[in-house]
Image (cartoon, rainbow, N blue to C red):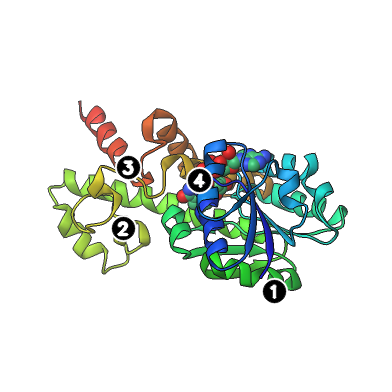
Amino acid sequence: MSTIAFLGLGNMGGPMAAKLVAAGHTVHGFDVVSAALERAGTTGVIVAADAVSAVADAEMVITMFPSGAHVLDAYREGLLAAAQHNTLFIDCSTIDVADAITARELAVAAGHRGMDAPVSGGVMGAEAGTLTFMVGAQAEDFESARPILDVMGGRVVHCGESGAGQAAKICNNMILGVSMIAVAEAFVLGEKLGLSNQALFDVASAASGQCWALTTNCPVPGPVPNSPANRDYQPGFAGALMAKDLGLALNALERTGTAAELGPLAAQIYRRFADEGGAGRDFSGIITVIRDNSEKVKG
Ligand code: NAD
């Protein structure tokens, strides 16, 4: 059993840390929000007075923060200095590929090991221990982390060297963002052509239009009974998170000079969706914007 520091005990980090405790690991946790810290305490996490004291005895340090700036600041402002030599730093936050590479470089320069291991699967996946981990790491660091990631995840994929986990995450979510917009536009067009949603679903779900956005997270109520559309677009995967992830994809598209057109457009569409009331709604709620805009065009 390992001694693990877990920093960032929010919607995702809280249940992930609880899974580690339930598996018998000793988890020292810290969050800057006292309510998150108290909640973690009720699941058996040992509540630390601050981040630095959480990492002092740890073999591994897991971070689950909102952004790359949070990760880099925390690393620079005490975490790396407070950890024992050769501690394995595992960042599970979704952050920019370039920030993930910098985070590992900082860890290595301070005498530690580092890796990126962002996740998909959301809060339900974190609670169930069925997250997918996308890992960017040296092979031997991946092997060291794997038993711990297996506790929190149902699928752990070694994507390559430092930054590769974040790269896989944003590429996947760019597919998801673009495909959801395509599915939503098709349903609105079908409605305008007098096609029932069920008829379009019955055809496309078994034809070349088939994709996760259609068959699992269907943006209209009815065809997939537990998709967020059936509960007025309560997430699920919130618009704010899709806007964030597509923003990270956009950074990477620009930095690499990738000649993408739909990715940047999807980033813009979801940024507007999040800013104009969709931040807390499931990202499939984009269909309501397309429908409303279609009425305006008609009017
Ligand atoms: P959250 O805001 O609920 O949790 C982040 C926590 O980090 C907060 O409790 C915050 O107080 C804490 N924090 C920030 N700076 C800190 C510091 N220096 N020291 C200690 N604690 C600090 O966010 P979340 O939904 O748990 O998401 C966390 C990460 O996981 C994000 O990068 C997000 O993009 C990613 N993610 C989220 C989901 C999801 O469905 N929520 C799914 C996949 C990936």
Q: Which residue lies furthest to the top in this view?
A: 299
Report the residue at 32% width, 60% height from top. 216
Q: What residue type is labelled 3?
A: Gly
Which quadrant holds the C terminus? top left
Q: Count neighbours of disc 1 (C-alpha within 10 A) and say few if under 14, some if 14 to 19, many if 20 or more.
A: few
The residue singled out by tag 2 in the image is: 214
- Which label lies toward us, 2 or 3? 3
* Residue 270: quadrant of the picture: top left
Q: Is residue 31 left or right of residue 140?
A: left
Task: Indicate which disc, 2 or 1, sits on the residue closer to the N terminus.
Answer: 1
Does residue 179 appear anywhere in the picture? yes
* Residue ID for mark 1: 143
Please tell me the numbered disc located at residue 285: 3
SS at badge 4: helix
Return the disc, 2 or 4, that comes first in the chain's sequence: 4
Q: Name the residue under label 4.
A: 39
Residue at x 55% of width, y 51% of height = 13
* Amino acid type, mark 2: Leu
How far apart, in angstroms, are the residues tagged by discs 2 and 3? Answer: 13 Å
In the rendered view, does 197 fall on the left or right side of 121? left
Residue 11 image point, x, y percent: 49, 47
Q: Nearer the viewer, mark 1 or mark 4?
A: 4
Viewer-nearest of discs 2 and 4: 4
- Mark 1 or mark 4: name the one nearer the start of the chain: 4
Q: Please name the residue shown 13% across and 52% down the image.
A: 196
Q: Residue 114 appears in which quarter of the rendering?
A: bottom right
Q: Mark 4 or mark 3: which comes first in sequence?
A: 4
Distance from disc 4 to disc 3, alpha carbons, whole Å, reads 30 Å
Q: Looking at the picture, tell me which residue is in the foreground, 228 or 202.
A: 228
Residue 98 appears in view:
no
Q: In this view, does 271 lie to the left or right of 116?
A: left
